[in-house]
Amino acid sequence: MSAIHTTHATAPVAPTSTALTVLLATGAGLSVASIYYSQPMLPAIARSLGVADNAVGTIPMLTQLGYAAGILFLIPLGDRFDRRKVILAKAVLLALSLLASALAPGLPTLLAASLAVGLMATLAQDFVPAAVTLAPPEARGKAVGAVMTGLLLGILLSRVVAGGVGQVAGWRTMFVAAAVGALLLALAVRAWVPSFAPTTQLGYRALLGSMLALWRQYPLLRRAAVAQGIISLGFSAFWSTLAVMLHVRFGLGSAVAGAFGLAGAAGALAAPIAGRWSDRYGPRRVAIVGAAVAAVSFAAMAGMAWLPAGAQMALLVLCAIGFDFGVQATLIAHQSTIYSLDAEARSRLNALLFTVMFVGMSSGALLGSLALAHGGWAAITALGVLSAAGAAWWRWRG
């Protein structure tokens, strides 16, 4: 694959490399946050639209399914066209999708807008290869780390911000604010991010075909992707139903559900730790240990049934920290695994990993909604244990 060349001809202002890295990290965080805004606001959305609580569980499912489809079908466009133009187009379309969510008169419109939000939020995955290209060779690792930190912070803060804004100003206001943020991001990219020369002249079908060939070629890719998809199922089931459970069991609003997103700090801490451990002990071991930690953390939630309300909340927080750390450690280990397979196809390998991962997450959102409706929180706990233990067993086999 030919080297990527950039030009600053279309960037009227050339920021410092540090400022540009901060912009890319911020863009990754803002973009990925879009797929999580709805989760702590689901009870409020259900009341506003006059639908059952379990019906709105389809919203995060479609958002995550859209994200998975976008990674598979849209991310390869960054190799075929100027990545800057791809980023700009996605940012504008993301803003329009978020605005459509805010203005949705009923659940069907909101579901369609949620799917579009997921598709365009794959913008987050376009910022990482941009950072690799624009950084000098001696600082590429630092730049990628910064952008991934921004992405993780976007996941972390999205639920907190959405929960607070949703409770104070309403869920529609949150989506309007997110749309404005996406438009401001587009303006910043237009002003400061340089153009990228395409790395291939392959047609769109050929690009997708090359991904299928990679999937067939590398058994380790298939094993890592499937394991991440399995563990993501339970992870998504928890986060997609948490707000409903807190509302029904404890009478708490979206702000508290969003505050649980602070447990995602464990995921941000897991990234550098899991990376160092993968280098020292091998990514397979780290993936198995991470999945095992997640399984134990999910299992510990079963103890909530024998505790008073205050202790239940404390245990829930500790368990959320534990399984979030385990899931993120497993993801970093699996990324380390696939990046070592083919240095010239890392974007497509990453797209395949995240496609399977978000298929698992969208399935988890749907199954979590059904499990909560028919089996209560105990069913969510069982689903989490089975998914994490299944991922550990799958990686143990190879």
Image (tube, helix red, strand yellow):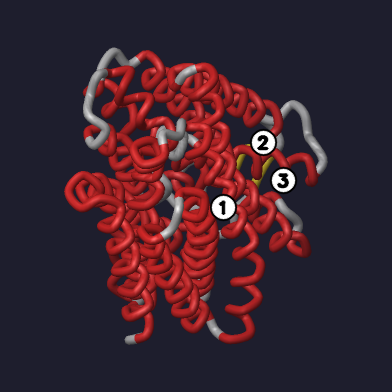
Q: Which residue is mark 1?
A: 263
Counting other residues with Cα less than 10 Å from the Cα at mark 3, is it few (<14), some (14-19), or many (20 or more)? many
Residue found 30% across the figure and 52% down from its top: 377
Say which of marks 1 and 3 sits in front.
1
Position of 143 relative to 196 (above/below): below
Relative image position of residue 68 (x, y in whole percent): 34, 48
Sequence-first tag of 1 and 3: 3
Does residue 295 sit above or below 161 in this rendering? below
The quarter in which the C terminus is drawn is: bottom left
- Most foreground residue, 69 or 316: 316
**Residue 254 percent location from the top left of the image:** 47, 32
* Residue type, numbered disc 2: Val
Give the residue type at disc 1: Ala
* Residue furthest left as drawn: 374
In the image, residue 363 sits, relative to residue 82, either above or below, namely: below
Q: Which mark is residue 193?
A: 2
Image disc number at residue 21 = 3
In this rendering, is residue 2 above or below 152?
A: below
3D distance between C-alphas at marks 1 and 2:
33 Å
Element under disc 1: helix
Say left or right for 291 vs 66.
right
Q: Position of residue 21 (x, y in %)?
A: 72, 45
Instruction: Name which of mark 1 and mark 2 comes first in the sequence.
Output: 2
Which of the labelled discs sits on residue 94, or is there none?
none
Give yes or no for contact between labels 1 and 3 (Cβ–Cβ under 8 Å): no
Going from N to C along the chain, the mark reached first, 3 or 2, is 3
Distance of label 3 from label 2 (alpha carbons): 10 Å
Foreground: 157 or 180?
Answer: 157
